[in-house]
Image (spheres, rainbow, N blue to C red):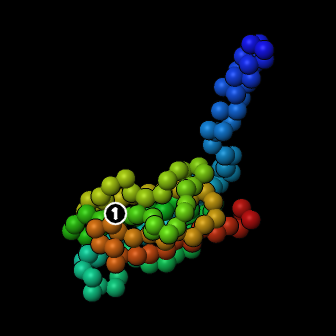
Amino acid sequence: MIIGAAVGVSYYQLYFIPELNAKPIIPEKVKHPGDTTTIIIVPGAENQQQEQNFVPKTIDVQLGINNLVIWKNTGDIGHTVTLDTDVNFEDKYSGKFGSPGIIKPGETYQFLFTQVATIKYHCDPHPWMKATVNIVHGATTS
């Protein structure tokens, strides 16, 4: 009985846990796309009357082509890139989506998308700043 328990625990620790925590196999073209996508946080984006804040507001990103997305804050105050609360998304390779804090003026936040999804996001301090990224299969990943 003790030997059986020891074998079971050993199997669990040596094979099951590492397999459970392993990152998925992602094609190199998806991990290292040929191009990037840049989303600009424009000056004055914090002004609620200004319609343009994340530019572009909606964009299609293709896996293996331009799925590394960079948000650049060109404004004068800090902003965030935060997943909307009604969206349940965690990239299986890159992890949780969203800036780890405030993106200061002149700074960037980047995220590598590796799976098809629709990501709706906003700025926490300025919740009227909303945008969407649609991640779709690229010509080489479908």
Which sits in the foreground, 63 or 35? 63
Is residue 110 visible in the rendered structure shown here?
yes
Give how far across and how far down residue 45 sits, in percent: 28, 76
Q: Point out the residue furthest to the left here.
A: 76
- Check the picture and name the quadrant holding the N terminus: top right
> From the viewer's perspective, is 32 left or right of 71?
right
Residue at image point 64% right, 64% down:
116
**Image vertical order of residue 96 relative to residue 63, above or below:** above
Q: Regarding mark 1 in the picture, which secondary structure is present there?
A: loop
Instruction: Residue at 49% x, 78% y: name it.
Output: 58
Q: Nearer the viewer, residue 141 or 12?
A: 12
Residue position for label 1: 80
Figure check: 89 above or below 55: above
Q: Position of residue 56 (x, y in %)?
A: 44, 77
Q: Residue at x 74, y 13 (%)?
A: 2
Foreground of the two, 17 or 55: 17
Q: Is residue 140 left or right of residue 126?
A: right
Q: Position of residue 93 (x, y in %)?
A: 59, 49
Give left or right: position of 121 versus 116: left
Task: Say few, some or many: other residues with alpha carbon within 10 Å of mark 1 (under 14 / 14 to 19 / 20 or more).
Answer: many
Query: Residue 73's x, y, as percent?
Result: 31, 66
Task: State whether residue 37 is above or below residue 97.
Answer: below
- Quadrant containing the C terminus is bottom right
Q: Amino acid at mark 1?
A: Thr
